[in-house]
Image (cartoon, rainbow, N blue to C red):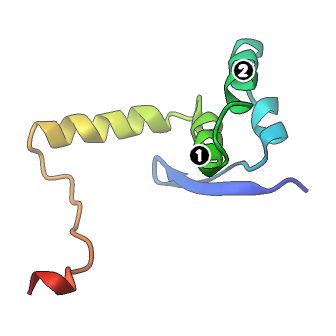
Protein backbone atom coordinates (compact mmCIF):
# COMPACT_ATOMS: atom_id res chain seq x y z
CA UNK A 1 0.00 0.00 0.00
CA UNK A 2 1.37 3.41 -0.98
CA UNK A 3 1.90 6.10 1.61
CA UNK A 4 -0.75 8.79 1.79
CA UNK A 5 -0.97 12.37 2.99
CA UNK A 6 -4.07 13.63 4.80
CA UNK A 7 -5.54 17.11 4.75
CA UNK A 8 -8.90 18.83 5.03
CA UNK A 9 -10.44 20.36 1.92
CA UNK A 10 -13.87 21.94 2.05
CA UNK A 11 -14.35 20.61 5.58
CA UNK A 12 -13.76 17.01 4.48
CA UNK A 13 -10.78 14.78 5.34
CA UNK A 14 -9.00 13.90 2.10
CA UNK A 15 -6.24 11.36 1.49
CA UNK A 16 -3.70 12.39 -1.11
CA UNK A 17 -1.01 10.28 -2.75
CA UNK A 18 2.18 10.28 -0.71
CA UNK A 19 4.87 9.01 -3.09
CA UNK A 20 6.40 10.44 -6.24
CA UNK A 21 4.96 7.58 -8.32
CA UNK A 22 1.48 7.91 -6.81
CA UNK A 23 1.39 11.68 -7.32
CA UNK A 24 2.50 11.27 -10.94
CA UNK A 25 -0.24 8.66 -11.50
CA UNK A 26 -3.04 11.13 -10.68
CA UNK A 27 -1.83 13.77 -13.14
CA UNK A 28 -2.97 14.14 -16.73
CA UNK A 29 -0.34 13.75 -19.46
CA UNK A 30 0.53 17.45 -19.61
CA UNK A 31 0.79 17.81 -15.86
CA UNK A 32 2.82 14.60 -15.61
CA UNK A 33 5.35 15.89 -18.15
CA UNK A 34 5.67 19.17 -16.21
CA UNK A 35 5.94 17.23 -12.93
CA UNK A 36 8.71 15.04 -14.36
CA UNK A 37 10.68 18.11 -15.52
CA UNK A 38 10.32 19.82 -12.14
CA UNK A 39 10.57 17.05 -9.57
CA UNK A 40 14.04 15.83 -10.51
CA UNK A 41 15.46 19.30 -9.82
CA UNK A 42 13.71 19.97 -6.48
CA UNK A 43 16.21 20.18 -3.60
CA UNK A 44 15.75 17.36 -1.09
CA UNK A 45 14.68 19.74 1.68
CA UNK A 46 11.90 21.12 -0.55
CA UNK A 47 10.68 17.77 -1.88
CA UNK A 48 7.83 17.25 0.64
CA UNK A 49 6.33 20.67 -0.13
CA UNK A 50 6.63 20.10 -3.89
CA UNK A 51 4.90 16.71 -3.62
CA UNK A 52 2.06 18.20 -1.57
CA UNK A 53 1.62 21.04 -4.09
CA UNK A 54 1.38 18.55 -6.96
CA UNK A 55 -0.86 16.16 -4.98
CA UNK A 56 -3.27 19.03 -4.31
CA UNK A 57 -3.49 19.96 -8.00
CA UNK A 58 -7.07 19.60 -9.14
CA UNK A 59 -8.54 19.14 -5.66
CA UNK A 60 -10.01 22.63 -5.32
CA UNK A 61 -7.73 23.41 -2.38
CA UNK A 62 -6.14 26.32 -4.26
CA UNK A 63 -9.53 27.91 -4.85
CA UNK A 64 -10.45 27.45 -1.18
CA UNK A 65 -7.21 29.13 -0.08
CA UNK A 66 -7.59 31.94 -2.62
CA UNK A 67 -11.11 32.63 -1.31
CA UNK A 68 -9.80 32.90 2.26
CA UNK A 69 -6.97 35.23 1.20
CA UNK A 70 -9.43 37.47 -0.67
CA UNK A 71 -11.70 37.59 2.36
CA UNK A 72 -8.74 38.49 4.60
CA UNK A 73 -7.64 41.21 2.16
CA UNK A 74 -11.12 42.74 2.43
CA UNK A 75 -10.70 42.79 6.22
CA UNK A 76 -13.33 40.13 6.82
CA UNK A 77 -13.17 38.15 10.06
CA UNK A 78 -12.78 34.52 8.95
CA UNK A 79 -12.76 33.15 12.48
CA UNK A 80 -9.03 32.56 12.63
CA UNK A 81 -7.49 32.48 16.07
CA UNK A 82 -4.02 33.46 17.16
CA UNK A 83 -1.30 30.98 17.96
CA UNK A 84 0.13 30.23 21.37
CA UNK A 85 1.19 33.28 23.36
CA UNK A 86 4.81 34.34 22.84
CA UNK A 87 6.56 33.74 26.20
CA UNK A 88 9.15 36.41 25.36
CA UNK A 89 6.49 39.07 24.69
CA UNK A 90 5.73 39.45 28.39
Residue at 59% over, 46% down: 46
Q: Quadrant of residue 73?
A: top left
Quarter of the N terminus within the rendering:
bottom right
Task: Give the quadrant of the C terminus.
Answer: bottom left
C-alpha separation, residue under disc 2 versus residue under disc 1: 15 Å
Q: How crowded is mark 1: few (under 14 residues within 10 Å), some or many (20 or more)?
A: few
The mark found on residue 71 in the picture is none
**Residue on which the image places disc 2:** 37
Q: Whole-percent x and y of residue 10?
A: 46, 46
**Residue 68: horizontal and vertical position, in percent?**
28, 42
Q: Is mark 1 on a helix, strand or loop?
A: helix
Name the residue located 65 percent from the left edge and 39 percent from the top edge: 55
Q: In front here: 69 or 49?
A: 49
Say what secondary structure mark 2 lies in.
Answer: helix
Q: Mark 1 points at which residue?
A: 46
Q: Which residue lies furthest to the top in this view?
A: 30
Q: Position of residue 59 (x, y in %)?
A: 57, 35
Q: Earlier in the sequence, mark 2 or mark 1?
A: 2
**Residue sitting at x 65%, y 36%:** 42
Amino acid sequence: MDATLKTVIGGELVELPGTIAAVRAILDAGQAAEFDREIEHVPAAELPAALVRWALAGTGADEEDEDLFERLARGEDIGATGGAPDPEAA
